Image (spheres, rainbow, N blue to C red):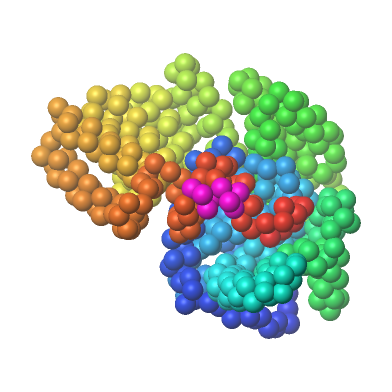
Amino acid sequence: MAQTALAPAKIPNLPALGGTESQDLSPLMERKLGEEIMRDIRRDRDYLDDAPILEYMNHFGNVLVDSRPDARGEAKYDYFFFVVRDPQLNAFALPGGFIAVHSALLLAAENESQLASVLGHEIGHVVQRHIARSIGQQKQDMLIPLAAMILAALASRQGGDAAIGVFLGGQGLAIQRQLNFGRDAEREADRIGFQIMGEAGFDTTGMVAFFQQMQQSTRNYSDLVPAWLLTHPLTTERIADIQARIREQPYKQRQDSLDFFLVRSRARVLQDQSSNGYNEAKLFFQAQIKQDSWQQKAAGQYGMAFLSMKQGDTTAAQTWLDQALETVNRPPPAGVFGASPRSKAETIFAATSIEIKLAQPDNKEVLAKAVTEADAARQKFPLSRGIAHQYGEALLAAGKLEEAGVYLRDQVQLYREDIEAYDLLAQVYSKQGKLALQHIALAESYNLQGGVMAALDQLGYARKSPDASFYDQSLIDAREREWQARRREELGDKGKKDMGNSSPAFKLEMKSDQDNKDSGFSPYTNPFDRIRQITDPLQQGSSVR
């Protein structure tokens, strides 16, 4: 059947449940907290810092965000979507519009509508400002244990276990109220996500299909835990709720983009980079290539290309990439009429072709081709930051240092928070022997990553460099004053630990070492584990949060 452009589904207006608690945590403070956490996450090995994956996720996610005018809130959040390496089916939203998807969930999604159901759910958490509201709820709940302690002191006159019973009863009530808030928040996020999917033109049945898949993956755990101990409603309840809303919606078909399948191939290789992981990925791609679907076949061939490059076989990588391109560009079989135009995923193919060439640093002829390809690609795809970085890498690898320096200086002026551009610029200055500029560029990079003390150290090295000019010294002075003032603001009261020497995530808690031990919280744990610990205190099974 011929594919036609889909109009947004007519979704009935749903009530916005609950109010916001901007007086407890303002939108600007939410964003600042989210940025602090992201600085920690970006340094973690489980963060998939892969340009094609990040670009796809952010383009796809912002299509959903733009379908709902109020999604960015009064602070006009710039949403950021990213993937973390994790074998559990899960996703989570951070304060201020930062949304993460586990790699296993990306691989488990069978189509873009299912992925949209997850991202829509997480966007719902941000839209409803559940983090700010939970802080307001916790402030109220702090009064319950306090009241229980007073009652326990009175009950202690009677002796026995009466005091302990009263105290534990108060704690139990506070915990139950927090659990109730979590369940209500999940229901709200489901309903907002359902609205967003329909308004963006996705098949809303994808939410039910994915919930059913998640139910199967967590069945063993869910059967052992009573419903009232879960911070979110049981999957069966959520499925029934969404099914009731879908009944009046007409079925519509949506063709998935080729980018979706190629990004999943990259994620499959990056999820487990051990020998066993590569072998499993190879077997999966080989089976995928045998399928009848041209998208599945192309994704399998592309996966083999990416896997071969990661294993150091660039010749095989280029061969597989050419085969994938041939599959995509092959016309449909004779007798097939009315088929919609095939998506080409040109940006991903161009980036991968350049990537394969940059993986051959000793072949000058290939590097020269990489420069030419990257130059053409950046002009064709001006919004791709990954290709923009590849052009700088290609110039640097080919020894075109002057061109690389001019280009990268323009990039850091246009994109002042581009960490990779600063790192590449530092490499150019290093090869040119410009020590002061090298240290200044590194200082900018460290500052953007949250390492203020390391950035100030780099400024100190730059100041002492023999080639530091008067202009360089002026820039160093200005940056030192700015960053030292920000560091003093972050440190706050005298005597607090230097945050530059510890993990910046969750700084607002400012707990003592003993408090951290008592709560099972350590500043040196994996940031993803810490987020799961905070958002999932009962250590329950995988679920979209």
Q: What span is colored magenta in the figure?
A: 513-520
Is 243 colored magenta in this rendering? no
Residue located 64% across and 35% down the image: 270
Q: Is residue 400 visible?
A: yes
Q: Magenta region, mostly helix, strand or loop?
A: helix
> Is residue 177 toward the left or the right of residue 72 in the image?
right
Quadrant of the drawing holding the C terminus:
bottom right
Considering the image in quadrants, where does the N terminus appear? bottom right
The residue lying at 71 percent from left, 66 percent from top is 164
Q: Can residue 51 be seen in this view?
A: no
515 drawn magenta:
yes
Q: Is residue 101 above or below residue 29?
A: above
Q: Is residue 438 left or right of residue 390?
A: left
Q: Where is residue 176 in the image (x, y as percent from the top left)?
A: 72, 70
Residue 63 occupies quadrant: bottom right
Image x and y of residue 202, in percent? 72, 65
Q: How many labels does the image show?
A: 0
User: Which residue extends farthest left?
Assistant: 470
Which residue is at a point 24% across and 24% down the rendered structure image? 433
- Indicate the position of residue 446 as horizontal and vertical percent values: 36, 41
